[in-house]
Amino acid sequence: MSGVLEIDLTDKLDAMVKEIFQTMIPLPIESMGGKDGVHPAEGTEMLAILGFTGTATGSIAVSTTRECAKMVTAALLMMGPDETIPEEDVADALGEFANMVGGNLKNTAVEGGVKMDLAAPAIIDGQQIHTSPGSKIVRGFTRDYQVGGKPLSVSFSVEANRD
Amino acid sequence: MANILIVDDSGTMRKIIMRGIRQAGFKVENFVEAGDGVQGLSALEGNSVDLILSDVNMPNMNGLDFLAAVREKYGPSTPVVMITTEGSNDVVNEARTRGANGYLKKPFTPEQVQTVLGPFIG
């Protein structure tokens, strides 16, 4: 049995996301609860996926609308209202947010005796993005948020061991 | 006025770090940017810097290998502070062993930036 499966990361994930916002992204964030499985945010147009390997294999995904991703980028970069947000910064900022979530989850996992190596975030930018969880996923959960009134979700999933 | 090398594969994070340093009240003459350890070593060839800030997880050459290369080539004189989400004891201890002078965990506040970087550029 994978060690990641035995650590309850649900509440920790919620706390981490809120800490990241409180520390570096000055936008109001409201937790809208969670659910089992991997579910992108409503109207998802941007998705940042961070894979991990080690004791278990899986991924962390951040999904949101482009409008929300732009709000997060502007807040992360402390941009003024008259500044233009470069498009490349929007994808990079969402990836960096996923990276911070993943890195902090890793710290929790490592404290629980779990080895976890993170990959660089991959960004998918499109319209009406849908995800289909693979059949190998043995555990997954999603936390939903409203950021400045816009939807943002963070999902965590673990795949069955390959051996 | 300090010259600072920032090594991070995220251009956005480099911007965040630069703004964070300015927001913390430090006077910086010049920021030199690099996207990985290899670029960081190249940047050091042509620039004299007072402080190096480096991410850990990067392509081509990660931050720990970059740190070891800096110490091997330039010795202990230039302070290196690791800025990363990798805050586990193993990574922190490895960074210290390889010669890191400090550690700043993401997410960070301007106050934390001030506390960690102050001894080197304050």
Image (cartoon, helix red, strand yellow):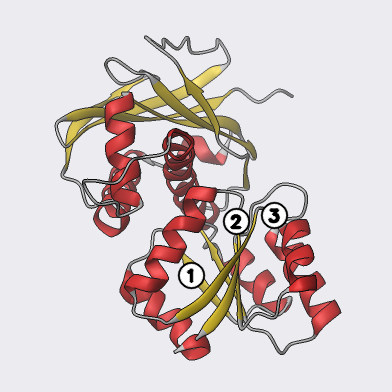
Q: Secondary structure at mark 1?
A: strand
In the image, what residue type sits under mark 1?
Leu
* Front residue (pair B101, B73): B73
Q: Badge 1 sits on which subunit?
A: B
Mark 2 highlights which residue? B8
Q: Secondary structure at mark 3?
A: loop
The numbered dot on residue A103 is none
The numbered dot on residue B36 is 3
**Label 3: few (<14), some (14–19) or many (≥20) C-alpha neighbours in 10 Å:** many
Q: Earlier in the sequence, mark 2 or mark 3?
A: 2
Q: Position of residue B119 (x, y in %)?
A: 48, 90
Q: Position of residue A54 (x, y in %)?
A: 66, 40
Q: CA distance from mark 3 to mark 1?
A: 18 Å
Q: Quadrant of the C terminus of chain B?
A: bottom left
Location of residue B59 with respect to B7 vertically, above or below: above
Is label 3 in contact with label 1 (beta carbons under 8 Å)? no
* Front residue (pair A121, A78): A78
